[in-house]
């Protein structure tokens, strides 16, 4: 374990052909693999991470004013294969949030537009990583 408080780590282990378990350092697990059955594909996990990252920020900021009656998100993207390789384009994150018809609910609704702008421009680590185009190093090595 690293002494770096900024380091984020997950591990992946093969459980069967084209099926893997991803584990975080706190013991959480997600099954991922191909699009067979109900397991998530890597692309679906990525889209879910985009939705969840923004949703957490939106929830934490607005809930200081009022608890949402509904907070949902959907991420849409198109997969393309072109001269740049396989990738997603036209990524769109849509949030559907509502608050009670109270003064606190009005206060929460009032901060939604600014919060959405902040999610896109500085808060959401997942989408910011994509937007700024952070390079990824892929290598082999002993993980023990």
Image (cartoon, helix red, strand yellow):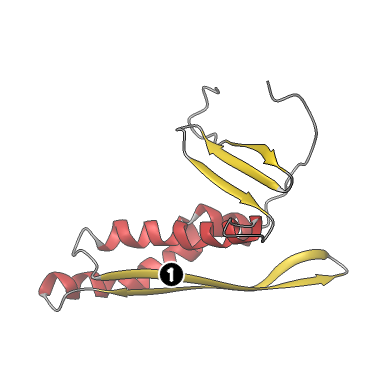
Q: In this view of the protein, which residue sits in the foreground, 34 or 7?
A: 34
Q: In this view of the protein, which residue sits in the foreground, 24 or 122?
A: 24
As drawn, is 31 to the left or to the right of 34?
left
Helix, strand or loop under label 1? strand
Is 16 located above or below residue 68 in the figure?
above
As drawn, is 108 to the left or to the right of 140?
left
Residue reaching furthest bottom?
A: 101
Circle 1 residues within 10 Å: few <14, some 14–19, many ≥20: some
Is 15 located above or below residue 116 in the figure?
above
Q: Quadrant of residue 65?
A: bottom left
For the C terminus, the image quarter is top right
Q: Position of residue 136 (x, y in %)?
A: 73, 46
Q: Position of residue 38 (x, y in %)?
A: 57, 59
Q: Which residue is mark 1?
A: 73
Q: Position of residue 107 (x, y in %)?
A: 19, 71
Which residue is at 44% across, 62% downward?
119
Is 90 located above or below residue 13 in the figure?
below
Which residue is at 74% across, 45% downward?
17
For the N terminus, the image quarter is top right
Which residue is at 49% across, 65% downward?
120
Q: Quadrant of residue 139?
A: top right
């Amino acid at each position: 374990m690293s002494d770096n408080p900024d380091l984020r780590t997950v591990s992946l282990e093969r459980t069967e052909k084209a099926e893997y378990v991803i584990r975080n350092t706190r013991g959480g697990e997600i099954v991922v693999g191909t699009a067979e059955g109900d397991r998530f594909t890597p692309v679906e996990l990525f889209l879910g991470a985009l939705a969840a990252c923004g949703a957490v920020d939106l929830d934490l900021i607005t809930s200081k004013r009022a608890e949402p009656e509904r907070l949902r998100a959907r991420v849409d993207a198109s997969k393309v294969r072109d001269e740049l390789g396989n990738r997603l384009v036209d990524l769109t994150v849509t949030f559907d949030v509502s608050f009670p018809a109270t003064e606190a609910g009005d206060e929460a609704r009032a901060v939604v537009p600014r919060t959405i702008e902040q999610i896109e421009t500085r808060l959401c680590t997942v989408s910011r990583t994509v937007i700024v185009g952070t390079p990824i190093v892929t290598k082999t090595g002993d993980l023990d």
